[in-house]
Amino acid sequence: MNVWTGIAVYIVIWWVVIFMVLPWGVRPLGAEDIAKGHASGAPHQPRILTKMAVTTIIAALVWVGVYFLIDSGAISFRE
């Protein structure tokens, strides 16, 4: 796997993981917290920076596993 392929695979893994991490710990706003113009299903504290950091760590671990699978020849995209 060359550098550009590795970066592309990491970006795809990162986006898949962020969509799995986003729902963690989400609590909707209470009826008393809803201000005019806010969606009732909006999270109380989204903690997006924490979720992005967790996503980066998980994606790096998954990428290392994928890299070793491809590098060992267990998975091959060429004949």
Image: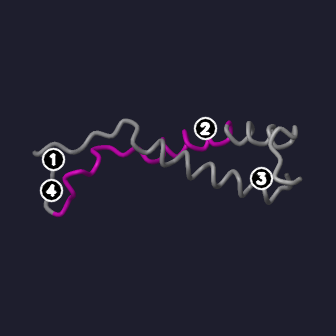
Secondary structure state at the residue bearing disc 2: helix
Q: Residue furthest bottom?
A: 37
Amino acid type, residue under disc 4 in the picture: Ala
Q: Amino acid at mark 2?
A: Ile
Residue 33 spot, x, y in % from top left: 15, 47
Residue at left offset 74%, top offset 55%? 7
Q: Which mark is residue 35?
A: 4
> Which disc, if any, is residue 6?
3
Q: Would you say 54 lies left or right of 8 here? A: left
Q: Is residue 54 magenta?
A: yes
Report the Cα–Cα distance between label 4 and label 3: 45 Å
- Residue 13: % across, % down: 63, 49
User: Label 3 crowding class (10 Å Cα cut-off): few <14, some 14-19, many 20+?
Assistant: some
Q: Which residue is mark 1?
A: 33
Q: Position of residue 38 (x, y in %)?
A: 20, 59
The 10 Å Cα crowd at callout 2, few under 14, some 14 to 19, many 20 or more, is some
